[in-house]
């Protein structure tokens, strides 16, 4: 939980320096990494819901929208970790890019559905560069979160996403 809250704070600091389409969404990347590596489903779901609600409060947007969508990211990452081979930077980055495009479209869709606001005429072109930046950052954030979870003993050893242990052999 502390890692996610730290990511929200760091996100705010980085966003003041790097403009939005080129600034990775660190908090959402942490949610993705937690989904890929966390042991308990219920505790992970509650944690990402709290992190999503913190993002709702800080963004000033639709209350509960980010919480709901981050729970979907968590569940998607859990399912993907069990069904897909996300070992390596390229498969993880590809999965993250698709997930971030879907997340961006879902945020717009939820906002439009609940507020009746018209679809934005600008910003659609920022969606792809933002997904690319997040895809490039996903392996790094996942490895960092994995190291922290291993350090605290909360890592699911059966689902090492990036294979960061060079002495471990897979057959």
Image (cartoon, helix red, strand yellow):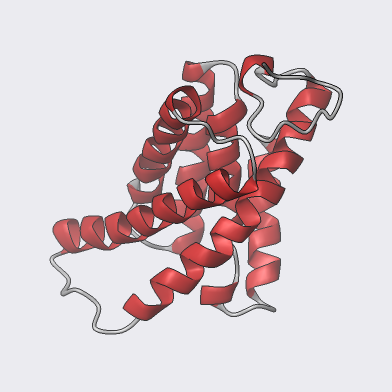
Rendered location of residue 81, percent (x, y): 50, 28
Q: Quadrant of residue 126?
A: bottom left
Left or right: 74 as drawn, with respect to 161: left
Examine the rendered structure and indicate whether residue 150 appears above or below residue 60.
Answer: above
Left or right: 73 as drawn, with respect to 157: left
**Which of the two residues, 153 or 118, is positioned nearer the viewer here?**
153
- The residue furthest front is 171
Left or right: 14 as drawn, with respect to 74: right
Examine the rendered structure and indicate whether residue 129 appears above or below residue 32.
Answer: below
Residue positioned 25% across, 78% down in the render: 120
Residue positioned 51% across, 59% down in the render: 58
Q: Quadrant of the C terminus?
A: top right
Examine the rendered structure and indicate whether residue 131 appears above or below residue 120.
Answer: above
Rendered location of residue 83, percent (x, y): 43, 25
Rendered location of residue 100, percent (x, y): 43, 55
Left or right: 70 as drawn, with respect to 119: right
Rendered location of residue 101, percent (x, y): 38, 59
- The residue furthest bottom is 122
**Which of the two residues, 10 or 106, is positioned nearer the viewer here?**
106
Q: Quadrant of the N terminus?
A: top right
Residue positioned 49% across, 51% down in the render: 94
Examine the rendered structure and indicate whether residue 73 appears above or below residue 19.
Answer: above
């Amino acid at each position: 939980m502390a890692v996610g809250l730290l990511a929200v704070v760091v996100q705010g600091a980085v966003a003041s320096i790097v403009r939005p389409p080129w600034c990775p969404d660190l908090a959402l990347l942490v949610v993705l990494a937690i989904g890929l590596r966390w042991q308990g489903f219920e505790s992970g779901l509650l944690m990402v819901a709290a992190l999503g609600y913190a993002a709702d409060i800080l963004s000033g947007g639709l209350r509960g929208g980010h919480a709901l969508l981050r729970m979907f990211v968590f569940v998607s990452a859990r399912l993907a970790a069990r069904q897909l081979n996300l070992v390596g930077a390229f498969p993880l980055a590809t999965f993250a890019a698709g997930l971030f495009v879907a997340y961006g479209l879902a945020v717009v869709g939820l906002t439009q559905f609940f507020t009746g606001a018209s679809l934005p005429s600008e910003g659609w072109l920022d969606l792809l560069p933002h997904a690319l930046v997040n895809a490039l950052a996903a392996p790094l954030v996942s490895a960092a979160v994995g190291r922290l979870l291993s350090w605290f003993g909360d890592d699911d050893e059966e689902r090492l996403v990036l294979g960061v242990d060079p002495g471990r052999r897979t057959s």
